[in-house]
Amino acid sequence: MNADLFSLSGRVALVTGASSGIGRGLALGLAAAGARVVAVARRADRLDGLVREIEQSGGSALAAQADVTDAENIERAFDAAERAYGTVNVIVSNAGVTDARNFLKIEPAARDAVFDTNFRGVWNVGQIAARRLVAAKQGGSIINVASVLGLGVQPGLASYCASKGAVVQLTRAMAIDLGKHNIRVNALAPGWFKTELNEEFFDSPTGIERIAQMPARRLGRIEELVGPVVMLASDAGSFVNGSVIAVDGALNALVA
């Protein structure tokens, strides 16, 4: 096997929601594979440590402030990326939020807040990235972070499940429309990974019981998402398009 298939040397990768959790881990992984990384978050000050870590490891990174629900914000982030590195050709739409409430108790504003980030944000980033790639006559790889709960559902997460299901279908539609431009679009469907947003729950008795019911009997480690993302971003995934890759320890087999 040619190891260069997985190299991201010469590529420019933009990652949203990069200030913590999965986004931060994916930014580090893409940099380790050779990509120049543009780390995007609503609060750019929270990206300083990530940029330093990448640079101290010999990589190159840029922090950009943007709210994915605001298309003008995203345009400015891409402008900054292009000034520093040229056309962005690897895009990881990771920014996301959740709202753990029963369907009967979800007000329209709360529902819309989840869809604005999880679905509209993915749409904004993907459309802006694709238009710029087409204008530059370049191919690329767009990776939308969906969820295992976009493939099946669990109680009390109606807005989240619906928004991630929409991301799965959007990914497939994008792949069909953009394939002729040599732009591949795939989705990653993570299961449960411990992050700063959920660690309190998973350390609780209820969370520990939930883990015990999972097929893998454990949570995922963020570094376990890096391999699939690097594959999708690199030449190793050159014929993978319109796919949804579950990285979840077989949880999708239970929730589907």
Image (cartoon, rainbow, N blue to C red):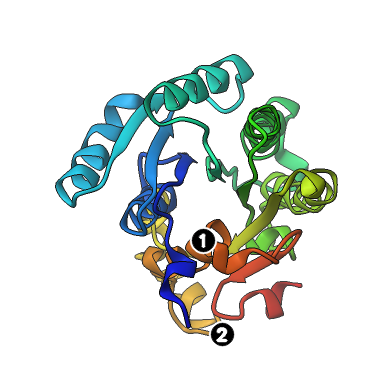
**Residue ID at (31%, 57%):** 32
> Please, what is the three-letter code of the amino acid marked with disc 1?
Val
* Secondary structure at numbered mark 1: helix
Q: Is residue 239 above or below residue 77?
A: below
- Up the image or down, 53 lies above or below 46; here it is below
Picture residue at 20% right of the left edge, 43% below the top: 55
x 56%, y 85%: residue: 215
- Whether residue 224 is situated above or below residue 66 in the rendered picture: below
- At label 2, which amino acid type do we have? Pro
Tag 2 residue: 215
The answer, for residue 134, to whether it is visible in the render is: yes
Across and down, in percent, residue 218 comes to: 43, 78
Q: Which disc is residue 184 wearing?
A: none
Mark closest to the chain's N terminus, 2 or 1: 2
122 or 234, which lies in front? 234
Image side of residue 227 versus residue 147, left or right = left
Instruction: Report the side of 215 relative to 41 (left or right).
Output: right
Q: Position of residue 221 (x, y in %)?
A: 38, 69
Q: Residue at x 42, y 47 (%)?
A: 10
The numbered dot on residue 229 is 1
Furthest toward the left, the residue is: 56
Q: Nearer the viewer, residue 199 or 87?
A: 87
Q: Is residue 136 left or right of residue 200?
A: right
